[in-house]
Image (tube, helix red, strand yellow):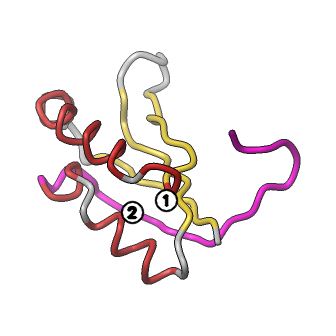
Amino acid sequence: MLFVAICLDKPDMHETRASTRPARDAWLKGHGDALKLTGPFLDPTGQKPVGSLLIVEAADLDAAKTMLAGDPYEEVGMFASIDVKPWRVGIGKLG
């Protein structure tokens, strides 16, 4: 089953995001095929990341939340909120 995670950063987390990025990249790559799509939300100028979107495959909502709890950005307290919802492709396709 697919889940979408909408993660919004706390204000002024740009330095934390940058310093944690290598650990996060390794974490993302470590999930292989379970991680379907990721990318940052951007500020109105389109320049600075202000959050993250992840689409993951997991057995159920609890498994998705457990996986996302290990996100290095979450571990350093970067997110103001994380909303995880079941999701399916409507039009188009992943990968």
Residue 41 on image: x %, y %? 47, 36
Q: Is residue 11 above or below residue 84?
A: above
Quick check: marks 1 and 2 in contact, CB under 8 Å?
yes
Residue type for callout 1: Ala
Q: Check disc 2: other Cα within 10 Å, few if <14, some if 14-19, many if 20+.
A: some
Q: Is residue 94 above or below residue 56?
A: above
Residue 67 on image: x %, y %? 35, 67
Residue 95 on image: x %, y %? 68, 39
Residue type for callout 2: Ile
Q: Residue at x 53, y 59 (%)?
A: 56
Check if residue 47 falls in the magenta segment. Answer: no
Residue 57 on image: x %, y %? 56, 64
Query: What residue is pinned by disc 1?
Result: 5
Query: What residue is pinned by disc 2?
Result: 82
Q: Residue at x 27, y 55 (%)?
A: 71
Question: Which is closer to the viewer, label 1 or label 2?
Answer: 1
Q: Residue at x 88, y 47 (%)?
A: 91
Q: Which residues are magenta?
A: 76-95
- Give the quadrant of the N terminus: bottom right
Name the element at disc 1. Answer: strand
